[in-house]
Structures are given as structure tokens and as C-alpha cells.
Image (cartoon, helix red, strand yellow):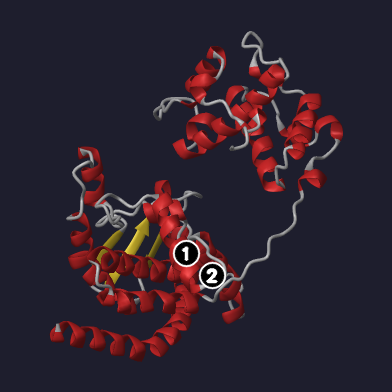
Amino acid sequence: MPKNPDPRRKWRRLHEWPAAYRQAWQEATAPGDDLDEASYGKSLRPSSLDTMARNFGRWLTFLDGRGELDDRVPPAQMVTPARIADYLRELQEMGYCAQSSVLAISGISCAMRILAPTRDWRWIWAPNGVKLSPHLKGRRKEFPVPHPSELYGWGLELLAQADAQKRPQRRLAQYRDGLIICLLASRAIRRRSFAAMQIGKHLFRNADGWRLKFEPEDVKNRRWIEFDAPKTLTPWINRYVSEIRPALLLRTMKSVTANGIAKAATALWVSSDGTALTEAGLTTAMWNRSRRKFTLPFATHRFRHAVGTHAPVDDPEHPGIATSLLSIGARMHAKHYNRARDHVAETKYYSAIEEERKKSKLVAKHLIAQNRKSNDES
């Protein structure tokens, strides 16, 4: 029989909060316009608010379990040094790792900045003057970080070998995943921004090839990102846009809603059932692909580790190359120097990847020729 889950691990969803707490939260986070007074709660994205609400809901479960949750008492009065210390002890008793404990405490701190913005809540990280940081240090996880050129070459292999797949669904998915891997290896955009890409908006064609653009509202740190896709990917992107993506859209199942169909129509990345590829779907695809290729499977964030780890080593003359590749600054006339530096970093990094492409070019040509020959014979 399955074990009964520890009730202390449950978290109260927003609709399960005390009515007064829920109303205060909704008023503090409701979208406003330019005439409204700026506030922390109104400046956050829905995804960030959901995370904070979930972690604060875990705090409410803790209070309820102690018989201390009272909707007649303002939420700010429920947060005391003694309760914060007891809460951390409970998290540790349940086996929460350091990172999970940090997120749980951060949920209280951020929620209080929303619900009681006039007070200073920095003390939460040092209740009674005792810093929590020594109790929140975990063991650093060690994991292999492939070189970006290895990841790029892996993506090219998947692209070149996609036509060898007999089942159309597998052929289309492998081609899509190969292109995703190449683009992530070349710039390592964050998962949320990458999965939400729209054709014509975030990926568009110009005279020199394909270009990617993310405006501040599309990026976690609200910075402008714009760069050219590697020239060697031009024919692969051409085929994805003109052939592979339309074929994936044709696989839309009858159960897909009109809203789902409309969303897929503009999405750059399309799943095997004809819907827009979600963040979870992107993670699953990368996890499954890497599990077959490497010792330990990984998801999209490993590409950022790869760029951040190897780019400075490959180009020691430009110590800021990793920062430039992972996040470009806003486009402002006063920052031409930074933009020039980013362009130099981008060019040098792509040159390193180009070396891997040259090594893989003959292999790719051979595989494509074999596939065409087998198709002609059949």
C-alpha cells in the first residue's frame, strides 16, 4: 500500500487561504496601469506570483498545523522570529534540502513584501539576530558539463539522422529536438523564454540569415536579447520552418481546443500532437534525448552551465564572454561599447562551435546521402 503523505508537506492553494488573506493578496497583485502607484506585487510576473503564493501557502499549512492560523489576525502579525525558527526546524525534520528550505523561507519574505510593503522584512533571514545562512548550506552537486561544441555536434547528428526514422512522428520530433539542441548550445536561452518563442516575433529572417530577438518582457531579468543564429544552421532552420513545423501542426488531435490550435499557430516549437510545446514538454524532450547520449540525463539549464563553464576557458582574453553570451544588455545609444563587446563575444564563441561543425560536416553529408539512397531504393 502507498504511504500516506505527510500532511505537513501540503500547501494551501490561493483559494484555500483565509478570506482576508486572499483578498489582500489579490488587491496587492492585481494588474494596474501607468497611473497606479508602483508596488512590488504589481511588478511581478504571474509565474513569479504563483511560486510565491505556493511557498506562502506552505507557511499557512505550518501555522494551521500548530492551531495558530487565525484570519482575524493580519498576516504580518503571524510572522515572528520564534515561528520562523520553528518553521525552519520543521522543514529540516521533514528532510527538506537546503535549496528547498531557502525557497520556503523566501516565500514568506516575498509574500510579506506584497502584503505588508511598508515594513522591513529583511530580519526574516536573521530571526533574533541569528543568521539562517549557516543552516541553509547544502552540499554542492557535482555533474558533468559537456562542451558546447559537443552539444552542438550532438544536435547536428540528430538533424542529419532524423530522416532515417521510419515513423513520421519520430522523424519530425527528432529533427525539432536536434535544432533546439543546436540553438541552445549556441546561446543557452532560459527555458521559459525559449519555449515561448513565436515565429515571426522571436525568430525572423533577414538578409544575412535567421535572427533571434527577445524583448525585456520576454526575459527573466528584463534585458533585451538579440543575436544572429549561427550561419551553419540556416538550411536546417529553413527546412524546419517550411516543412517540419507545418507537418507537426497537421498532427493536431481532434481533442485540442480552439485556443490550443490558435496558440500552436504562432508557436515556433510544436509538439508531436500539434500543440505548442510547453516548458514541461521541452524539459522532457531534452531529458529523454540526453539520457540516450550521455551518462547522466539533463534538461535545458545544463546548456547554460556549458556556456558559462567553457566559454571563458576557450577565450581567456575576454573574461566577460560568458556574461555577454548568456544575457545581452538593453539597446541604448549610451551603451554602444557593451553591444560591440557582445558582438565580439558572439563571433568568437560561434567560431569555436564552427570547428565542431567542420568535424561533423562530412559525417552529416554521408548520413544524408545514405538516407536518400535508401529512400530511392524503397
Q: Residues within 10 Å of mark 1 (few under 14, many from 20)?
A: many
Quadrant for the N terminus, please.
top right
Which residue position is annotated with label 2? 307
Q: Position of residue 300 (x, y in %)?
A: 48, 60
Tags 2 and 1 touching, CB below 8 Å: yes
Q: How crowded is mark 2: few (under 14 residues within 10 Å), some or many (20 or more)?
A: many
**122 in relation to 210, above or below:** above
**358 in relation to 227, above or below:** below
Q: Residue furthest front?
A: 1
Q: Tell me the element at label 1.
A: loop
Q: State left or right for residue 274 relative to residue 356.
A: left
* 2 or 1: tag closer to the N-terminus: 1
Q: Tell me the element at label 2.
A: helix
Q: Position of residue 267 (x, y in %)?
A: 28, 52
Give the residue type at disc 2.
Answer: Val
Q: Position of residue 318 (x, y in %)?
A: 58, 76
Q: Distance between the residues labelled 2 and 1?
A: 7 Å
Total labels: the figure holds 2
Camera-side residue: 78 or 178? 178
Name the residue at 85% across, 30% down: 128
Which residue position is annotated with label 1? 188
Q: Where is residue 351 in the image (x, y as percent from the top left)?
A: 44, 82
Q: State left or right for residue 317 relative to residue 211.
A: right
Q: Which quadrant of the structure image shows residue 372? A: bottom left
Q: Would you say residue 319 is visible in this rendering?
A: yes
Name the residue at 76% across, 45% down: 136
Give the residue type at disc 1.
Answer: Ala
Quadrant for the C terminus, please.
bottom left
Q: Would you say residue 315 is visible in this rendering?
A: no
Name the residue at 62% across, 33% down: 5
